[in-house]
């Protein structure tokens, strides 16, 4: 099993430069960067969005926009453990098939998303989705 290494370099004060295993930078600080605890639900949303779009492209679903939000519930006292994360998918397109979307989300959650697989036994993860029909005004 290959190992992947990520990195966090302290810059100054409470500013850290994070780098993924491909050396892509992310600034962690507030208010001009991401909060460390937000990286967990962000990772879940991003991982699942990636999978879902890959699956829907293969199914030739005409998605024109996707927004994925992740709302989390944490303990009020340190270490403020995550207890629940609700993921909401908002798809925009013309003639999107709800069954295909539902199946793509299920595949991501149960087979492909490593973040979901890692968290699901320790955090209550739920999800839902909505479909917004794209405006056809101006279409010929």
Image: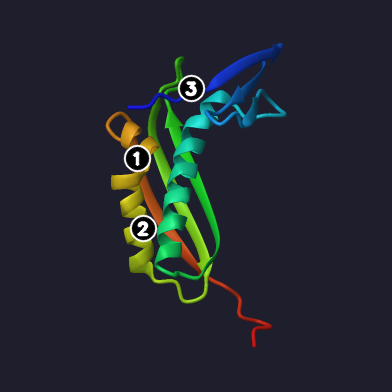
Quote the CA–CA distance across marks 2 and 3.
29 Å
Question: In the displayed image of the protein, which residue is found farthest to the bottom?
Answer: 140
Which structural element holds mark 2?
A: helix
Q: Quadrant of residue 38?
A: top right
Judged by depth in the image, the label closer to the viewer, 2 or 3, is 3
Q: Residues within 10 Å of mark 1 (few under 14, many from 20)?
A: some
Q: Earlier in the sequence, mark 2 or mark 3?
A: 3
- Residue 124 vs residue 68, the one in the foreground: 68
122 vs 9, left or right, is left
Q: Mark 1 vs mark 2: which is more N-terminal? A: 2
> Which is nearer the eye, 98 or 111?
111
| Residue pointed to by mark 1 | 125
Identify which residue is drawn at 51% across, 46% down.
69
In this picture the colour scheme is rainbow
Query: Picture coordinates of residue 44 (x, y %)?
Result: 44, 39
Q: Is residue 30 left or right of residue 96?
A: right
Give the tally of numbered discs. 3
Whether 117 is drawn above or below 105: the answer is above
Q: Quadrant of residue 29?
A: top right
Along the line of sight, which residue is nearer the eye, 57 or 130?
Answer: 57
Asked which secondary structure carries label 1, the reply is: strand
Q: Does 73 appear above or below 53?
A: above
Tell me which label, 3 or 1, sits earlier in the chain. 3
Q: Which mark is residue 5?
A: 3
Label 1 and label 2: CA atoms lie apart by 16 Å
Tag 2 residue: 104
Q: Select label 3 or label 1 by which is in front.
A: 3
Q: Which residue shows up at 44% across the image and 70% down it?
A: 60
């Amino acid at each position: 099993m290959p190992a992947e290494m990520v990195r966090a370099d302290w810059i100054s004060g409470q500013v850290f430069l994070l780098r993924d295993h491909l050396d892509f930078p992310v600034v962690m600080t507030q208010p001009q960067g991401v909060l460390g605890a937000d990286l967990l639900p962000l990772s879940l949303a991003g991982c699942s969005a990636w999978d879902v779009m890959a699956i829907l492209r293969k199914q030739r679903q005409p998605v024109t926009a996707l927004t994925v939000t992740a709302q989390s519930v944490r303990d009020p006292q340190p270490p403020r453990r995550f207890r629940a994360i609700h993921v909401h998918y908002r798809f925009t397109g013309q003639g999107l098939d709800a069954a295909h979307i539902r199946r793509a989300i299920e595949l991501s959650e149960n087979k492909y998303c490593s973040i979901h697989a890692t968290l699901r036994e320790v955090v209550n993860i739920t999800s839902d989705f909505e479909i917004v029909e794209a405006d056809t005004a101006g279409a010929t």
